Image: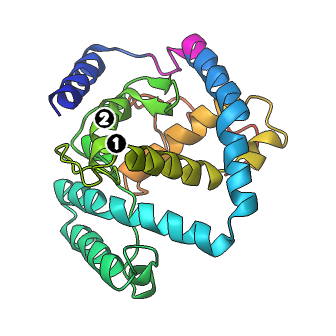
Amino acid sequence: MKNIFLVSAIFLLIAGCASAPPEDPLEPFNRNMFSFNEKLDSAVTKPVAKAYVAVTPAPVRTWVSNFFGNLQDPWIGFNNLLQGKFADAINDLMRFVFNSTLGIGGLLDIASEAGMPKHDEDFGQTLGVWGVKEGPFIVLPLFGPHTLRDAAALPLDAAASSPWTLPYGNPIVHDEKARYGLSGMKMIDGRARLLGLERTLDEGTLDKYRYMRDFYLQQRRFKVLDGNVPIEYDDFDNPDEGADNTPQNPGGEQ
């Protein structure tokens, strides 16, 4: 846990000191890392995800997604609490209770049917609500697109929402092979849910890297600001009244 906080502190220190230009200052590095991640995905992750979809019935895939989503609800609720959204935090806690009991350990999303919507919050968004600047865009090996602020929060988000440990590192699943199995299953489930989205990138997108970057930044700002994104919004938190900073998506709108 100490290492997690140390890594986060280092990232935040860098974010506070950096004076990033409006454009992507790390673009050469990011493009190379994007290419590396794509090649690794094409060789390993994507084929496994396709095989998983091919052999696993849709209801079972839904149960798997519900299971992992249910384990994330307490952390989502905690971040809503940190952001001062108390009603949403209570909703998230109740979702976890309902789905963990009536939903057979989270396999069924009973809470959504009962009118308790699922939220999407993480510590990166919490830092944004607290006023921490997003910093430059960066593509991480294996973990993909992030802002520097989100990268700082990544270790804590990963530890807190893991299906085999508590946020303070106490193991829920003690068997090491079982933990690896859950890790792999969570990764495959997440990749399988993106198979439909990637068709948009492949069909007519001239610059997949730029599309990915602009889409990521746009949706992260939308989440941090709960949809109240200013019309004039610079790429890296610096409003520029005379500029048109609307993210351009060569592949079309998502």
Figure check: 214 above or below 52: above
**Can residue 195 be seen in the rendering of this structure?**
no
Q: Quick check: 67 above or below 247?
A: below
Q: Which residue is at 72% across, 46% downward?
A: 198
Vertical comparison of 181 with 28: above or below: below
Give the CA separation, mark 2 to mark 1.
Answer: 5 Å
- Quadrant in which residue 79 is drawn: bottom left
Magenta-colored span? 21-29
Relative vertical location of residue 252 with respect to residue 12 in this rendering, above or below: below
* Residue located beneath label 1 in the image: 158
Q: Position of residue 12 (x, y in %)?
A: 25, 24
Kind of residue sitting beneath label 2: Pro
Q: Residue at x 37, y 25 (%)?
A: 135
Q: Within 10 Å of the Cα at label 2, are there few (<14), some (14-19), or many (20+) other Cα atoms?
A: some
Q: Which disc is residue 155 wearing?
A: 2
Q: Position of residue 49 (x, y in %)?
A: 67, 49
Cβ atoms at labels 2 and 1 below 8 Å apart: yes
